[in-house]
Image: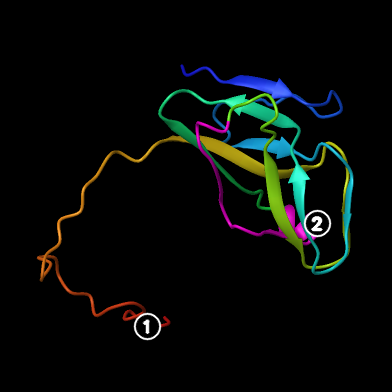
Amino acid sequence: MEQIKIKYFTDKIDKLEYIDGKSDWIDLRASEEVTLKKGEFKLIPLGVAMELPKGYEAHIVPRSSTYKNFGLIQANHCGIVDGSYCGDNDMWRMPVIAMRDTTIHVNDRICQFRIMKNQPRICFEQVDHLEGADRGGFGSTGKN
């Protein structure tokens, strides 16, 4: 089992927990109250910093209910926390855009994360033609 060192910036949010058998994703919570008007951008503080295992990165995405409950979309659609972002002041945040006026309260679950192994080292070989079957290009399978 991999070990992750975690620092909490506040005692006002619930501690992270892995719910075995229910999800591979772990919920993250807002660590301060945030009020946004429609169209505003904000980096919502998540109240944690972590030291990930060597060779891993974290992927942060909205929870399935984030838009319904708060009217927020994640500005970068998937946040990537690389393993070098692991210092005492490297608090995780979620960049959001409000699609309606909204308030996020301390301890509200607004996003989730999972850790993934880093991409293996690769090299690119330039060729004139690829050997795979040609599917017709982007969007070629139609609407239905």
Whether residue 84 is visible = yes
Give the residue type at disc 2: Phe
Vertically, is 102 above or below 26? below
According to the picture, the residue beneath numbered tag 1 turns out to be 142
Q: Magenta span covers which residues?
A: 66-85
Whether residue 19 is visible = no
Q: Disc 2 vs disc 1: Cβ atoms closer than 8 Å?
A: no
- CA gap, disc 2 and disc 1: 34 Å
Assess disc 1: are there few (<14), some (14-19) or many (≥20) residues with their C-alpha within 10 Å of its C-alpha: few
**On the rendered structure, is 119 left or right of 3?**
left
| Residue name at image x 66 percent, y 32 percent | 90
Q: Position of residue 12 (x, y in %)?
A: 87, 28
Task: Name the quarter where the C terminus is drawn.
Answer: bottom left
Assess disc 2: are there few (<14), some (14-19) or many (≥20) residues with their C-alpha within 10 Å of its C-alpha: some
Q: Position of residue 62 (x, y in %)?
A: 65, 50
**On the rendered structure, is 4 left or right of 94?**
left
As for residue 40 lying within the magenta part, the answer is no
Q: Quadrant of residue 102?
A: bottom right
| Residue name at image x 45 percent, y 31 percent | 56
Instruction: Give the foreground label among 2 and 1.
Output: 2
Q: Position of residue 131 (x, y in %)?
A: 9, 65
Vertically, is 19 above or below 71? above
Q: Position of residue 111 (x, y in %)?
A: 68, 45
As for residue 79 lying within the magenta part, the answer is yes
Say which label, 2 or 1, has the lower sequence index: 2
Give the residue type at disc 1: Gly
| Residue name at image x 56 percent, y 20 percent | 4
Looking at the rendered structure, the secondary structure element under dot 2 is helix
According to the picture, the residue beneath numbered tag 2 turns out to be 70
